[in-house]
Every structure is written in C-alpha cells, then in structure tokens.
Image (tube, helix red, strand yellow):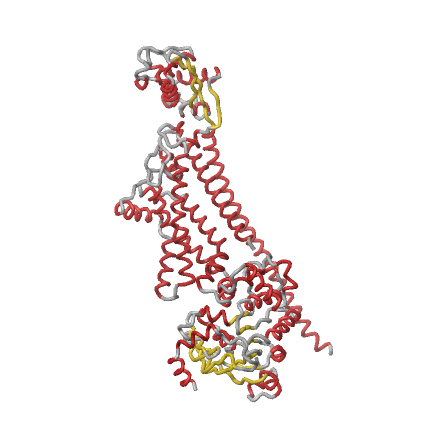
C-alpha cells in the first residue's frame, strides 16, 4: 500500500466527518426543541388539571362543614293537643324557643318568628313532631332538638354572606345577622362534618340536600349498563373477530360500529326516548331506561376495545390450540379470550366510567326531574350524579353552588374508584402467568 | 389410479369412518402412511403448490427441503388441514392417511388434528402451567377418565419428549418460564399426549441455539420408532442428520423425492444438485 492509495480514502473520511459535524449541532438543537415542546405540553395539561381541581375543591369543601343548632323547646300544652299532633305548628315552637335564647319575644304579627324560620331548617320542626308523635307524654315538657341551620345562615357563618353588603342586597337583614352572632356566641351552634350530604337525597332546601339518591341511581344505572353492554359487546366482538367470514357485509358492520362510537351521545338519548319510552312504554326517568340508553352508547366502545384486545393475542396461540385438535370455539374460549381479558376488562370499565359521567342522553329521557328520595327499584324515578350536578348548577340559590362542586367531587371520586378497579383487574388477570 | 380409488370411497363411505377409529397404530416400517396425489393449493388467486404427489413412510422421518417460499410449509399444513384456517386458501387433490381422504368434507378437522400432531417454528406453549400444556389435548379429547390417568399421560409424554427430568419438580409453573429448547420439547410433549399417528414439524429448530437443536434432533430420531414424522427444514445438514427420506420443493413443485442418502450424494435433478451444493436458496 502506498500513500497515494490511502490518502483519497482518508480525505473522504475527513469530508464525511466535517459534513456530519456541521449538521450535528442543528440535530441536537432539534432534539432539545422537541423535548422542550413535549415537556411544555405536559406542564400545560397538568396545570389546567390542577386549576380545575383547586377550583372545584375551593368551591365545594365548605359543603362538608355543617352548622347545627341545638334548641330547648317547651312543648306548650296550649298549642299542642295530643289528639291533633299533626295540626300543631312545631316550627313556631322552635322559633319561639330560639327567640327566647336571643332575648326577644315574638310580636303579634309573628314577624320575628318567621324571620327566625328563615335561619333554621324546618328539619327541627319535623324532628320535634316525630318525637311527640312517638311519645305524647312529652307534651308539657321541654325537649332538646338539634338540626341544621338554613343554607343562608350557614353562608353567613362561612363568611360568604358579608355584613358589609348593603342590607337590601342580601337575603338576611341586620336583625337576623345580630341573632346569628348572638346564637354563635351563646354556644348553641356547633360545626360538624356534614354526614347528611351523603345520607340524604335531593331537596328543595339546600341544607337538607344530599347525593345519596344520585349515587344509588348512578350505581343502579351502571349495573344495567354493565349487564347489557359488557356481555353483548364482548360476544359481538368475539364473533366478528374470530368467527365471522371476512366479506363485504362484515366490513360494512365494522365501519358502522366505528361510526356508532362517534355518534353524539344526545342522539342515543333521542333514540332511547323514541324506542324505550314512547314505543315500549318503559317508565321514564328510571335507572332501567337510563341504563339501556347508556348500554347502547357503550356497546361500540366495548366492541372496539375487545376486538383490538383479541387482535393483540398472538396467532401462534391459536395455531397451537388448533394444532392439538381444539375446535374453533375451544380455541377462543380456552386460550384467546382469557389472554385478551385484561384488555377487555380495561375497555369495559373505561366505557362504564364514560357512561357514569354522561348527562346529555339522560336529559332526553326525562332524568332531569327533581327526585327527593332514594330509588327503590330499577323502574322507579331516579336521578344520577352528573344530572344532579346539572340540576344544582341551575338552581338559583347560592348555597346549591357549593353543593354542585361537592357533587362533582363525589362524581370524580366514583370515577377514580372505577379506574382503580380497572387497573387492579388488569394486574390480576395479567399476573396469572 | 386416483379414479379407481374415488370409486371405492364412493361405494364404501362407512368403511372410511371405521378407519378413523381403528387406525393402524403399528404398521411395519416403510409402509406408506400419508399419500398425497396431485395436490394444488391456492391462496386467493395465487397458486402456491402445483400437482404435488408424495408418499410419506410410516415410522420414518421425511424431510421437506427447498428455498424460502417453495411451498414446503404449505404442503405440510395440508396434511392436518391447517390451511383451512387461512381465509381464501383452497386445497385441491387427495391426501390420504391410511387410505382415508383428509380433505373429505365429512371428516372433522378436530378428529384429523388429534391424529396428526403439529410442532411450529416458534415454540408456542400456552400461557399456562407445564402440566396444563400437556394435559390440554387429552382433556379436550376426553382421552383419560381420571385425574391419575391424566397425570400418567402427562408424565409419559414429558418423558418421551425428554423433558421429565428437567421439569418434574415444577409442573405447576408457567410453560413460558422454560428456555426456548425446553419450550419446543414441551410443545412436542403436548403433541404426543394425544397419541397422534403423524407428527408434522415446521422448522422446529429455527429459533433454537445449536445445543437445543441437537437435543431436538436426538428426540426426533427417538420418536421415529413410533411415529410417522414430516419435518420442514431450512438446514440441509439437519435434513441429512435426521431424515430417512427427503423431498425437494422448488417454486411450488415437488422436484424430487427419495432416500436421504441418495438425494444428498446423487441427486437426479440439476436444481436439487444446485440447491444442496449451495448455489441458490
């Protein structure tokens, strides 16, 4: 080898190196830029999420603080007769007891007592009536009763209704605020965790409104949805993926299923209204109809998720099973479906979580009505969490707004639980081998 | 000759079904077990096999060799009708196992595949325990009546596959925890467990290292005393080592078939000569 033979190669290597290095800087810069954009996108997304969470919690946490008043009420025999307990005005008795506590007497027109009734929940009167009904010997005695303050009074204690506001602009006048201050300093008011929010259903009085009815309604509706959408969806997907011939018909079905997944949910509500309520005369506003509508809506998602889970099972497993003489059905149910199970489960639970948060189609089937109780059956009128949020958000009373945020928190907690279930189930099925 | 055979079958369909049950398990060595006549295979419009006629001997290893895409795997998959599972695949011609037509519509592929076991290129144990892998076949075919009998079948199959000593202490661990070579022997044990008459192997060693390959080859040599084995291989050395008969495929046609030592020392066709001397493929 001579120098003449080597130098052209060396020169070529040098030019190559120079041109690579010249571009290297730009390439590294490009990588850094891309990394930065990615991080920026994540930061933006997370900060929006944080903002949302902070706002909801800030608005809703006060719901969980309950202001309760305890009053010693004298059951005046002159006003309550044992023969007609229901005819007595227990609210008035409570109001008088509280007036006495703040050192005032009712006037002849009953103006003062009706102002007191604006401060305390009528729950106290109902409790009193129940106690006297159960034991008429209480007439003529003084009994203690504890109940929630009205929402406006609670708002004052929470600092949301300010004395600084002009008297005519606020719901409570100066006299009422003075009474509230006196009651507070006398120790008749106690604060506690608002368990009532979880043990009561919707009410026209914000202080008595809770989410129990909506939680039970949502649960019942999801049971209907899951029982319909999961088995039907999984079976449809198994048939389409494993058994159906591949021809124009099945192609068309596949395209249509994908299209159905993209249909706006309110259209399913219209369909449910037309088919289940108008045609099949199913009870409107019930978990049954809500579940049916959401099952229709969840079906395409379940089918698509199941099909992709089945597609992900390696064909070698199918060949192995067919090779030892398993039939098509045995191959699918002994080997393919169990392997696809984590994916199927995840798809099913995510579509259930989606159904849980769905509002629009439920409005179409009349689920927007005021339901003060816990539904007792699948055909009873019920409300569900997202609709409850919608109803409270539209309420004019200010105290409902904090409850809206609190109901959203409950809804989010419900969803987090479902997603956790999805993760745990997935782990469980995957860990088997 | 084919016409004559068709006549016999048409007149005696009952005989055919009896043959399924009382299969000749211990035919003498050298007797023809699988007889293929004028087999054509189409994948949609494309023809993959052209008029293949081949006899496969009982209790011997027949190697199918040839360059990639020559149709050797396609032919193998005709024998247990695995091509049925490919959409658009069509098989013409006759393939007989003990005079019974494999492509008969009345023959359920499930019955056929219980008689003809298969081992694939990539070890594909089920994601279940070692025991369950071997027990699966006997269980779905109802071959055993008690748990102890099933355990006996599993042990015998694993022993025959030369895997028992390595796994008998961990039968209830996952089959996929084994090494590649062990997995392939597990798959062979799974095939043996249903007592097949024919075992098809589609490049069983192509995913294995030389030591695991040597073990499998040893096992194949052992198994040929009891089974009719057809093996597809890319390695001519392997064909020479394990097989008694070799068939050379090229471009969808069977070029030549004959005793292995003859094929490798004195091929009749120039294409065979070129392939085995490494000029193409």
Q: Which residue is at the front of the view, B232 or A347? A: B232
* Residue A29 location (% of width, % of height): 58, 56
Residue at image position (58%, 76%) is: B234
* Residue B76 location (% of width, % of height): 51, 75
Furthest residue toward left? A279
Q: Which residue is at the front of the view, B239 or A274? A: B239
Residue at image position (39%, 41%) is: A220
B54 sits to left or right of A400: right
Is residue B165 depicted above or below A80 in this figure? below
* Residue A158 location (% of width, % of height): 46, 25
Furthest residue toward right? A2
Q: Quadrant of the C terminus of chain A?
A: bottom right
**Residue A26 shows up from this direction:** no
Is residue A73 depicted above or below A391 in this figure? above
Q: Quadrant of the N terminus of chain A?
A: bottom right
Number of numbered discs visible in the structure rendering: 0
Is residue A81 depicted above or below A221 in this figure? above
Q: Which residue is at the front of the view, A371 or A6? A: A371
* Residue A15 location (% of width, % of height): 64, 68
**Residue B105 shows up from this direction:** yes
Q: In the picture, residue A139 is in which quadrant?
A: top left
Residue at image position (33%, 38%) is: A380
């Amino acid at each position: 080898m001579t120098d003449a033979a080597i130098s052209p190669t060396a020169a070529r290597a040098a030019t190559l190196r120079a041109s690579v290095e010249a571009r290297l800087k730009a390439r590294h810069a490009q990588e850094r830029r891309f990394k930065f954009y990615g991080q920026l996108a994540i930061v933006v997304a997370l900060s929006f999420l944080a903002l949302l969470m902070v706002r909801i919690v800030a608005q809703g946490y006060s719901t969980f603080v309950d202001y309760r008043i305890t009053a010693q009420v004298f059951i005046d025999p002159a006003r309550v007769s044992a023969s007609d307990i229901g005819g007595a005005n227990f609210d008035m008795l409570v109001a008088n007891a509280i007036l006495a506590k703040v050192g005032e007497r009712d006037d002849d027109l009953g103006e003062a007592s009706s102002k007191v009734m604006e401060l305390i929940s009528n729950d106290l009167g109902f409790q009193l009536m129940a106690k006297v009904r159960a034991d008429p010997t209480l007439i003529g005695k003084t009994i203690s009763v504890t109940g929630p303050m009205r929402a406006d009074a609670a708002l004052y204690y929470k600092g949301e209704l300010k004395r600084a506001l002009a008297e005519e602009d606020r719901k409570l006048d100066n006299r009422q605020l003075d009474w509230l201050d006196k009651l507070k300093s006398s120790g008749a008011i106690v604060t506690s965790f608002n368990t009532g929010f979880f043990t009561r259903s919707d009410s026209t009085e914000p202080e008595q409104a809770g989410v129990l009815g909506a939680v039970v309604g949502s649960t019942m509706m999801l049971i209907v949805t899951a029982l319909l959408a999961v088995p039907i969806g999984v079976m449809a997907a198994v048939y389409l993926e494993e058994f159906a011939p591949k021809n124009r018909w099945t192609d068309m079905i596949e395209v249509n299923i994908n299209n159905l997944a993209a249909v706006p949910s309110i259209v399913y509500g219209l369909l449910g209204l037309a088919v289940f309520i108008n045609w099949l005369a199913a009870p409107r506003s019930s978990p049954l109809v809500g579940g049916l509508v959401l099952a229709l809506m969840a079906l395409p998602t379940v089918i698509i998720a199941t099909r992709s889970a089945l597609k992900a099972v390696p064909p070698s497993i199918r060949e192995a099973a067919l090779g030892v003489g398993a039939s098509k059905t045995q191959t699918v149910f002994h080997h393919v479906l169990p392997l696809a199970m984590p994916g199927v489960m995840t798809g099913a639970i995510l579509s259930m979580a989606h159904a849980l948060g769905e509002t629009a189609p439920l409005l179409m089937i009349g689920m927007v009505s005021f339901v003060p109780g816990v539904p007792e059956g699948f055909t009873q009128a019920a409300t569900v969490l997202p609709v409850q949020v919608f109803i409270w958000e539209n309420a004019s009373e200010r105290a409902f707004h904090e409850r809206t945020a609190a109901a959203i928190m409950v809804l989010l907690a419900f969803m987090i639980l479902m997603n956790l279930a999805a993760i745990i189930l997935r782990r469980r099925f995957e860990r088997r081998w | 000759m084919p016409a004559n055979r068709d006549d016999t079958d048409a007149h005696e369909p009952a005989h055919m079904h009896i043959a399924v049950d009382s299969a000749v398990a211990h035919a003498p060595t050298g007797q023809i077990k699988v007889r293929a006549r004028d087999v054509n295979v189409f994948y949609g419009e494309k023809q993959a096999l052209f008029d293949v006629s081949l006899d496969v001997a009982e209790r011997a290893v027949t190697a199918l060799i040839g360059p990639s895409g020559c149709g050797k795997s396609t032919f193998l998959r005709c024998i247990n009708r695995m091509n049925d599972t490919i959409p658009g695949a069509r098989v013409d011609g006759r393939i007989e196992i003990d005079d019974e037509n494999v492509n008969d519509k009345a023959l359920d592929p499930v019955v056929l595949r219980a008689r003809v076991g298969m081992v694939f290129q990539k070890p594909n144990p089920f994601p279940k325990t070692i025991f369950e892998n071997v027990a699966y076949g006997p269980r779905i075919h109802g071959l055993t009546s008690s748990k102890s009998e099933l355990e006996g079948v599993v042990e015998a199959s694993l022993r025959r596959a030369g895997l028992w000593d390595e796994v008998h202490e961990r039968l209830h661990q996952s089959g996929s925890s084994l090494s590649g070579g062990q997995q392939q022997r597990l798959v062979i044990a799974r095939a043996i467990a249903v007592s097949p008459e024919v075992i098809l192997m589609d490049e069983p060693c192509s995913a294995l290292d030389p030591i695991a390959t040597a073990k499998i080859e040893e096992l194949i040599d052992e198994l040929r005393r009891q089974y009719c084995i057809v093996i597809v291989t890319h390695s001519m050395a392997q064909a020479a080592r394990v097989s008694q008969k070799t068939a050379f495929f090229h471009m969808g046609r069977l070029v030549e078939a004959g005793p292995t030592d003859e094929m490798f020392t004195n091929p009749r066709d120039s294409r065979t000569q070129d392939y085995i001397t490494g000029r193409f493929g």
